[in-house]
Image (tube, rainbow, N blue to C red):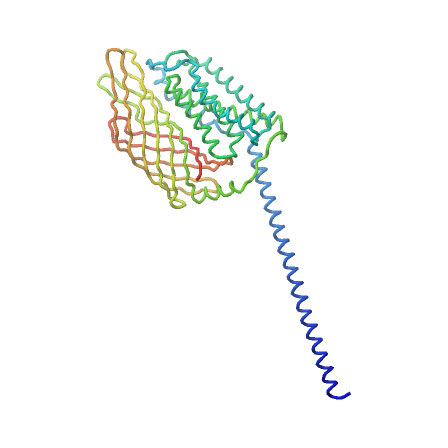
C-alpha cells in the first residue's frame, strides 16, 4: 500500500478511538448521574421513614397521655380547701349580705352551660371530636353524675351557710362545679381546633364564679372547691370511659404542622394574650377607732397582653378585677356585708427563658394604678365606709408557662402589689393562666 493509504487508515482508526472514548465518557457520566439520583432518593426515603416513625411515636405518647388520669383540678381543689381553713374565722363572723336573685340563679347556670351546649352543637354539626358518639355520651354523663354527687354530699355534710343566709348549702358551689365540668368537656373534645376553644371555655367558667360571689351566694372557698370537683370529675370520667372502651371510638391525636410551628414560636417569642384567674390576699384589715373591717380572700380575674421584643424580653399590659367580701369585726351588733372592688391597671417588662422545650420561667416588674370602689357597712344605726380612691402602685412577679398539647399554654403567676394607699397597701396574687399565642 502507498504511504497515503496507510496514513488515511491510521487517521480513521484514531477517529474511531476518539469517538469511542467520547461515547464511553457519556456513558460513564449518565451512569454516575443515575447512581447519584438513586442514592438521593434512598436518603430521602430513609429520612421520611425516620420522620414518620418519630411522628408515630409522638402521637402514641400523646394518646397515652390523653388516656391517662390528668391532674387538672387538683390545684383549684387544694386552693379551696386551704381557703376553707385560712378564711374560717371570716366566714363564721356574723354578717348579712343582701340577697340577689333566686336560690337557683338560672343565669349563672346558663353562663356555665355555654361550653357544654357548644360541645353538642359542634357534634351535631359533624365537626370531628375526640370521642365518637357513644363514648362522648358515656364520658359526659359520668362527669356530670360524679360532679353532682360529690357536690351534693358535701353540701349536706358540711351544712355551711350562704353569705345571704338563704340556706345552709353553700359549700361547695354547684354552679362552679357544673361550669368547670362544662368547660373541661369542651376543651377535651374540641380543644384541638383552636386555643380560643379552651380559653373561652374557662373564661365562661370563671364568669360563673364571679356571678355567684357577686350574687352573695358563695364564699371564695366554695367556688374553688366546686371548680376542683368539676375538673377532677371530668378527668376521672374520661379516664374511666377510656378504660371501658379502650381504643374503640376515639380519634387519635395527630401531629400537625401548626403544632410544630407553635412549639418553635413558644420557645422563641411567645407573644400572646392570657386569661388570668386567681386569688388575691395580703393586707385585708382596715382599722377604725372602735371596729375593724376585714375582707376574705378575694377572687381576681383579668388578662395579660405580652409582646416579646426579643426571645427573653417582653413588654406587658395587665388588667385585673378583684372582688373582696367585707365584714365588720369588733362590734356586738350584726352589720351588713359588702363587696370591695379593686381594679389593677399596669404595664411593665418581663424577662423569661425556656427551661426546656415547651416550658418557660420568668420574672417581671410593673407599675400603674389601683382603682378602688368603696364599701359601706351598717347595722341600721352606725355605718362604716371605705371611700373610693385611685392610687399609684408598683409590683414584681414570677411566671411559669407550659405549652399544652391542646394548642394553648397554661401556667401560674405569683405577683406582689404595693399600692401607695392607707387601705390594703400590700397585696399578693396567685393566679392560673391560659395563654393564646399570636
Residue 139 position, x and y percent, is 56, 24
Q: Residue at x 62, y 29 (%)?
A: 249
Which quadrant, please, contains the N terminus? bottom right
- Using residue 219 as the reference point, say whether residue 15 is left or right of it: right
Q: Is 189 located above or below residue 1 in the figure?
A: above
Task: Please tell me which residue lies in front, 1 or 158.
Answer: 1
In depth, the one of 151 and 157 nearer the eye is 151
Q: Which quadrant of the figure has residue 102? A: top left
- Residue 19 is left or right of residue 239, and the answer is right
Residue 145 spot, x, y in % from top left? 53, 19
Which residue occupies the foreground of this view, 96 or 274?
Answer: 274
Q: Nearer the viewer, residue 157 or 25?
A: 25
> Could you tell whether 70 is left or right of 363 in the image?
right
In the orientation shown, which residue stands out farthest toward the right? 1
Q: Where is residue 257 in the image (x, y as percent from the top left)?
A: 53, 42
From the top left corner, tell me how far across and down residue 48 is, in percent: 60, 48
Identity of the residue furthest to the bottom in this view: 2
Question: Residue drawn 66% across and 63% down?
Answer: 30
Quadrant assignment, res 320: top left
Picture quadrant of residue 161: top left
Pick the quarter of the image with the C terminus: top left
Q: How many numbered discs sit on the rendered protein?
A: 0
Q: Residue at x 53, y 26 (%)?
A: 121
Q: Is residue 254 above or below residue 299?
A: below
Amino acid at each position: 500500500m502507498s504511504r497515503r493509504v496507510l496514513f488515511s487508515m491510521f487517521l480513521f482508526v484514531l477517529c474511531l478511538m476518539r469517538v469511542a472514548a467520547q461515547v464511553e465518557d457519556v456513558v460513564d457520566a449518565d451512569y454516575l448521574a443515575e447512581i447519584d439520583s438513586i442514592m438521593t432518593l434512598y436518603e430521602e426515603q430513609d429520612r421520611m421513614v425516620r420522620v414518620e416513625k418519630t411522628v408515630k411515636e409522638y402521637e402514641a405518647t400523646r394518646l397515652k397521655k390523653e388516656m391517662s388520669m390528668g391532674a387538672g383540678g387538683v390545684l383549684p381543689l387544694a386552693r379551696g380547701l386551704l381557703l376553707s381553713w385560712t378564711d374560717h374565722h371570716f366566714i363564721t363572723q356574723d354578717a348579712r349580705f343582701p340577697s340577689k336573685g333566686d336560690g337557683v340563679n338560672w343565669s349563672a347556670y346558663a353562663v356555665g352551660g355555654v361550653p357544654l351546649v357548644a360541645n353538642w352543637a359542634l357534634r351535631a354539626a359533624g365537626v370531628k371530636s375526640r370521642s365518637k358518639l357513644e363514648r362522648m355520651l358515656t364520658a359526659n354523663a359520668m362527669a356530670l353524675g360524679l360532679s353532682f354527687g360529690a357536690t351534693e354530699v358535701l353540701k349536706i355534710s358540711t351544712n355551711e351557710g350562704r353569705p345571704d343566709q338563704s340556706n345552709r348549702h353553700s359549700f361547695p358551689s354547684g354552679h362552679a362545679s357544673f361550669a368547670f365540668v362544662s368547660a373541661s368537656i369542651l376543651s377535651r373534645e374540641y380543644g384541638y381546633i383552636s386555643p380560643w376553644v379552651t380559653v373561652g371555655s374557662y373564661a365562661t367558667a370563671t364568669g360563673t364564679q364571679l356571678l355567684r360571689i357577686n350574687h352573695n351566694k358563695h364564699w371564695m372557698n366554695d367556688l374553688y372547691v366546686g371548680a376542683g370537683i368539676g375538673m377532677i370529675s371530668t378527668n376521672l370520667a374520661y379516664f374511666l370511659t377510656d378504660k371501658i372502651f379502650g381504643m374503640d371510638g376515639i380519634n387519635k391525636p395527630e401531629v400537625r404542622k401548626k403544632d410544630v410551628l407553635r412549639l418553635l414560636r413558644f420557645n422563641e417569642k411567645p407573644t400572646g394574650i392570657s386569661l388570668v384567674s386567681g386569688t388575691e390576699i395580703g393586707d385585708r384589715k382596715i382599722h377604725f377607732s372602735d371596729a375593724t373591717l376585714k375582707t376574705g380572700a378575694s377572687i381576681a380575674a383579668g388578662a395579660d397582653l405580652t409582646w416579646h421584643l426579643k426571645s427573653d424580653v417582653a413588654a406587658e399590659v395587665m388588667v385585673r378585677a378583684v372582688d373582696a367580701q367585707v365584714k365588720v369585726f369588733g362590734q356586738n351588733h350584726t352589720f351588713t356585708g359588702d363587696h370591695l372592688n379593686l381594679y389593677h391597671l399596669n404595664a411593665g417588662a418581663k424577662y423569661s427563658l425556656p427551661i426546656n422545650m415547651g416550658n418557660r420561667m420568668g420574672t417581671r416588674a410593673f407599675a400603674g394604678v389601683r382603682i378602688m370602689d368603696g364599701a359601706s357597712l351598717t347595722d341600721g344605726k352606725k355605718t362604716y365606709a371605705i371611700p373610693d380612691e385611685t392610687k399609684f402602685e408598683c409590683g414584681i412577679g414570677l411566671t411559669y408557662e407550659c405549652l399544652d398539647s391542646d394548642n394553648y399554654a397554661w401556667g401560674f403567676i405569683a405577683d406582689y402589689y404595693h399600692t401607695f394607699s392607707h387601705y390594703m397597701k400590700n397585696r399578693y396574687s396567685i393566679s392560673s393562666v391560659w395563654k393564646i399565642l399570636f
